[in-house]
Image (cartoon, helix red, strand yellow):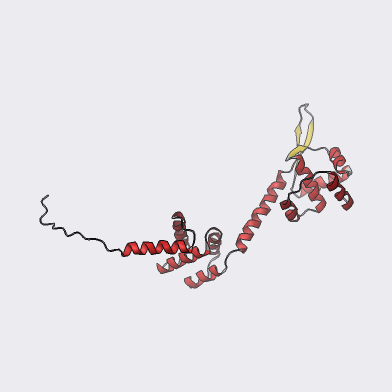
Amino acid sequence: MKQKQLVSLLEDRSIVVPLLFFKQYKKLNISLEEFVFLMYLKDRGNSFTFDPNVMADDLGLDIKDILSFISSLNDKKLLLIDTFKNDKGIVEEKIDISMFYAKFASIIAQEVVDNNENSIDNSIFSMIEKEFGRTLSPSELEYIKAWAITFDSGMIIEAVKEAVLNGVSSIRYIDKILYEWDKKGLKNADDVRHFLNTKDKELKEPVEVFDYDWFDDDE
């Protein structure tokens, strides 16, 4: 598809191109022309009868261009060509582009994970290593990455301090602390400090001892 044909296609037809698709299409390893063709297919639905003549007429292209696009996108596992029998018993072909949506969704999901990992406060890793007095193992690093995505960094730091205060240098122990705090509705370092202070006060409160004469108990 030449650039002039591409511009003409966008001017003549109402092809909806979500901005998210446009920003990320290069990660599918396809050309701009293949992307526009995919958007044309998208507008026709997830699954439909394959008629190269109709497509060629719609897009102002030769049938060989249509077949070239279909072949390329099929090789890249972005669409599937399947056969079926119509109501008259005639075998026809249909195009299914659900593979395109699945692959695109996996790209977006990975981007979310990458963005979350990039936003992790790396000082947490060094702080824990300093408190533990050793280098963290790969599995421990994965635990901490999961915490950083789920919990406030201040809350993680407080959990580490609590573990060290109890004489335990264990990632699993810290994980249990975070789990228990989360169940109690604690969301950040301030919540944790308030909870711990309240807990300390309750433990320090004197227990009232009743003066009871056990020897004169009539019962």
Determine whether, in the image, residue 169 is placed left or right of residue 32.
left
Provide residue 138's location: percent of width, then percent of height. 56, 64
Q: Residue at x 73, y 49 (%)?
A: 18
Determine whether, in the image, residue 128 is placed left or right of residue 25.
left
Provide residue 166's location: percent of width, then percent of height. 40, 67
Determine whether, in the image, residue 5 is placed left or right of residue 204.
right
Using the image as rendered, state which of residue 163 and residue 90 is in the foreground.
Answer: 163
127 versus 75 height, above or below = below
Provide residue 214's location: percent of width, then percent of height. 13, 57
Using the image as rendered, state which of residue 4 and residue 91 is in the foreground.
Answer: 4
Q: Residue at x 52, y 64 (%)?
A: 153
201 versus 183 height, above or below = below
How many numbered discs?
Answer: 0
Provide residue 94's location: percent of width, then percent of height. 77, 37
Q: Residue at x 67, y 50 (%)?
A: 105
Using the image as rendered, state which of residue 11 and residue 28 is in the foreground.
Answer: 11
122 versus 28 height, above or below = below
Residue at the limit of the structure toward the top, as seen here: 88
